[in-house]
Amino acid sequence: MTSISRRGFGGLFGASALGLAMPSLAFGAVPKVVVIGGGAGGATAARYLAKDSKGALDVTLVEASKRYYTCFFSNLYIGGFRKYGSIGHNYYGLAVNNRINVVHEWASSVDAAARSVTLASGGKLSYDKLVLSPGIALKYDSIAGYSPQAQGRMPHGWTSGTQAQQIRNQVLNMKKGGTFVMVPPPNPYRCPPGPYERVSMIAHLLRERNSTAKIIVLDPKAKFSKMGLFMAGWEKHYPGMIEWLGPDAHGGIRSVNHETMEIVTDLDTFKADAACVVPAQRAGSIAMAAGVTDGDWAPIIPATMASKADPNIHVLGDASVASSMPKSGFSANSQAKVAANAIRGELTGSRVYDPRFANTCWSLIATNDGVKVGANYKAGSEKIDVVDKFVSQGGESDDLRKTTYEESIGWYDGITSDMFS
Amino acid sequence: MGKINLRPHIARLVRLRVLAIAMMFGVISNAVAQADLANKIAKADIGYGEYLAGECVTCHRKSGTGIPQINGIEAETFVTIMKAYRSKELDNKVMQMVAGRLDNEQILSLAAYFSSLPE
């Protein structure tokens, strides 16, 4: 039983030491946890907090959308491998099966001193612990000429939903032999392999319907996630169709114009028939409003995902500075379980186990050609540190690539069930 | 003539007896190992297993394609499979990585948890 002391560090002193600090604990009321953001981080955190505390916590989830479209697999929708409806999910399971109070509103501000969240409607929610999982906000002004107005004709498609529909529609309606221009975002951003999987899916659509069309990738980065695997896949499945230009080749992206559909770089101006422009990113606005960000993102304490600025606020997923963990749905889901375990321990005195993190990102290059990259992590004192990692190799058999793709379908079913069931 | 050469028969008999004894020990040691494993699983920390399972259920669900269902799996089978991934005898990069950082006690806790679930 020596293992108890190793893992049970939070539980023993939790209730007594925090009883004074937590108003609802002092009066014997059920402690309140408010979770803002119903994506991979927030939905998972709310579900684990409610499921595992079995009524010992009062959990409220604030999410504006009644139907949530996952960013992961939105590329497969663009490529025609998934129906749009299959990437949409509702909050019925969280509300009914897990008895979470689901509030479909925008959270507009956080009063950290009063431990209170104000909703866009003016309503207020008080909390003992607040979980922020707001995902990203787009820095429209990171590219001159780009704006919420411009995203209608130059969709970013980085928040799924209608933006992903817009991209698919534009690809399907491109003129014969036309040019699609993809502008990936600079680091750090949500879903590192995402822009390149998107290029693959657009190429897949074009090869079937518009085989003389071209795709130009104007990348602000000199290298990217799974670069060798994507490059080899493009050469194999879409020879001559995709031209990737790094900063050495274009000199830097200067501006875009959604009316003329031009993308201006230092060395050349590119005219697009359809385009996807993904600007730089930062933590979702509520993280800024809560005062937990330092620059664009929110620093956290690795063992608990608590904000370094406020011990009663935990920040998950894309909005957090999770060091070597990529900004992915899988990462957010993994971080949510660590945070839920720590919060529950602190508020209810339940056992707190060793924090463990994991991530795997699958990407589809072409029909049955799936690749993956992943790692597992531990909580260091300052950073989340890599324990072990892997990546698919070049020259793998067709069978293995097909198995990898099928595995990604299983993962999608798994993670969405883990978030919403 | 008339005298039967027993030597090959004796040799065969000896070989068979050695084999029989070996098999007997094999069966016994196997049974002992199984009883020992069942005992260890019974003593495993199922609550810890439930926590660790958080990492598994991001991918494994009750039903689905591409990734096997592990709810209600036989505990001994679970332990054998996880150890085979850990030693890289079974070939899947994600599973080799997952199993790679699980110690025996953690595998037993997970086995106790998943085998306790309905299929």
Image (spheres, coloured by chain):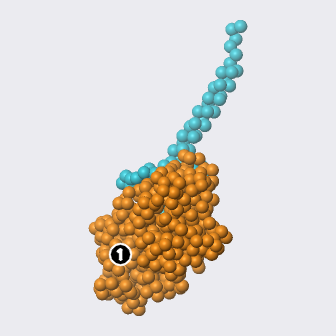
Residue B38 appearing in the image: no
Per the rendering, the colour in which chain A appears is orange
Left or right relative to A133: residue A65 = left
The relative height of residue A236 versus residue B45 in the rendered view (above or below) is above
Quarter-wise, where is residue A383 in the image? Answer: bottom right
Residue A232 appearing in the image: yes
In percent of width and height, residue A29 lies at 31, 83
The relative height of residue A143 versus residue A172 in the rendered view (above or below) is below
Q: Quadrant of the C terminus of chain A?
A: bottom left
Q: Residue at x 39, y 75 (%)?
A: A37
- Name the residue that disc number 1 marks: A63
Label 1 element class: loop
Circle 1 Cα neighbour tier, 10 Å, few/some/many (<14 / 14–19 / ≥20): many
Front-lying residue, A243 or A351: A243
In percent of width and height, residue A402 lies at 52, 49
Q: Residue at x 35, y 64 (%)?
A: A89
Front-lying residue, A93 or A140: A140
Q: Amino acid at mark 1?
A: Glu
Q: Residue at x 70, y 16 (%)?
A: B5
Per the rendering, the colour in which chain B appears is cyan
Left or right relative to A36: residue B27 = right
In percent of width and height, residue A411 lies at 45, 58
- Give the total of numbered labels: 1
Chain letter of the residue beneath label 1 in the structure image: A
Q: Residue at x 59, y 33 (%)?
A: B20
